[in-house]
Amino acid sequence: MPAEDVSTFCRKRSYAKQKGACSLAVHKDGRFRKEDYLTRRNFVFTGIGLPGLFAASALGASKAKITVGITVDTRPDWNGPQNFIRSLDEASAVGYHRVETFWPYVERWQHDPQGLKDVLASRNLTLETVSNGGQMRTDFGDPSQRAGVIEDHMKLVNFIHQFGCDHLKINCGRRQHVTGAAKAQMLAEMSRTFDEIGERMNALGMKFGIHAHLDSNFQTRDEIDAVLGQTNPKYVHFVLDTGHITMAGMDPVELTRKYVSRIIEFHVKDCAPRDRGGYKGPPLKPGTYNTTAENRVFYELGKGGVDFPGIVKILDRNSWEGWFTLELDRTATTAKNSCTISKAYLENVLNLKV
């Protein structure tokens, strides 16, 4: 089903307002399907409205305490510091209330945090967290750079602490293609650096989370297991990106089940249905995917490649508390339309409050 169709239906909740349109059914697995359109005649005859169709397949009240945020960085029209204000305006207009962003986007306010607070407050927004990036040092696996890496990240921590942020989410820099003993040593050094940052953040009442990301040093299952196995669970936590995890060949449901006690945040994006449970295609080479609307591998929620209801069930059983941060690197439509589609899925299928 075209993304624009989903967006149209989600914006127009009352069937009476739609002339000659069709209604949309959502399956229990959370996927939108073309064959589930109802004609207007059948719709009126059955007396079922769009909210009812969503409610029929929505999850019950969540026992997990899930807070929804959004990363305001979607290409083509939210990407880059120059589009930051636009992204805030449009995310707020759609109905989001908490935003995650990157250091280069807010660096202009590093000596004027109140200025950024005013920008956010005027749009009824608060800051979820700010990820590392830009000129920050990110070679976590080089012990000779450890002091500088920690210094840069603690400056960022002290900045976001002024906004009441409860965690820091970090990426691990460009992937270094090392193997064997060299790789094991790199992961061990990364773990030592993570532990030190996490311990310092813990003293501030904040949590430190590592984001698994394609083309980084924290990408594969063996790397995730190694780092989480060598770090202190009190100090180092996990940010599970449902898209990057899937495209790296892992099942985000299984990974959630294993590491539920370490996860503090999910980056929620969808993948193609054929990749449900883990990417099954040829190796992804940097620069060959997500560079255009045609070769993207991540999608709005509801595409069907990620079992989000299955993830939420695990979180419910474990009374989990943390963040669901909507994120999409690139969309084939506009960022505003994209996050409208995913907001409807979060609210009407996963029964989450945005």
Image (tube, rainbow, N blue to C red):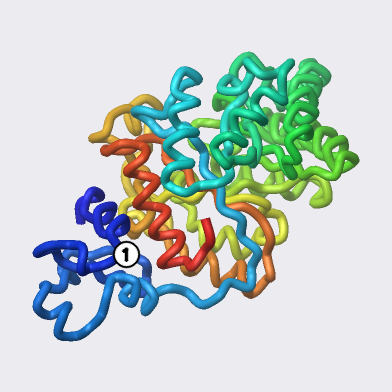
Residue at (69%, 42%) from the top-left corner? 209
- Residue 122 image position (x, y, % from top left): 58, 34
Side (left or right) of 279 relative to 47: right
Residue at (34%, 71%) from the top-left corner? 51
Side (left or right) of 194 relative to 80: right
- Residue 295 image position (x, y, % from top left): 27, 35
Crowdedness of circle 1 by 10 Å Cα count: few (<14), some, many (20+)?
Answer: many
Residue at (37%, 49%) from the top-left corner? 340
- Name the quadrant containing residue 65: bottom right
- Name the quadrant containing residue 121: top right
SS of the residue under disc 1 = loop
Asked if residue 75 is positioned above or below residue 321 in the image, the reply reads above
- Residue 17 image position (x, y, % from top left): 21, 63
Asked if residue 175 is positioned above or below residue 281 in the image, the reply reads above
Comparing 210 with 354, the one in front is 354
Comparing 286 with 336, the one in front is 336
Q: Is any atom of residue 151 visible in this view?
A: yes
Asked if residue 148 is positioned above or below residue 41 in the image, the reply reads above
Comparing 45 with 257, the one in front is 45
**Quarter of the picture holding the N terminus:** bottom left
Asked if residue 224 is positioned above or below residue 60 in the image, the reply reads above
User: What kind of residue is marked 1?
Assistant: Arg
Residue at (54%, 67%) from the top-left corner? 312
Side (left or right) of 244 relative to 270: right
- Name the quadrant containing residue 333: top left
Residue carrying label 1:
31
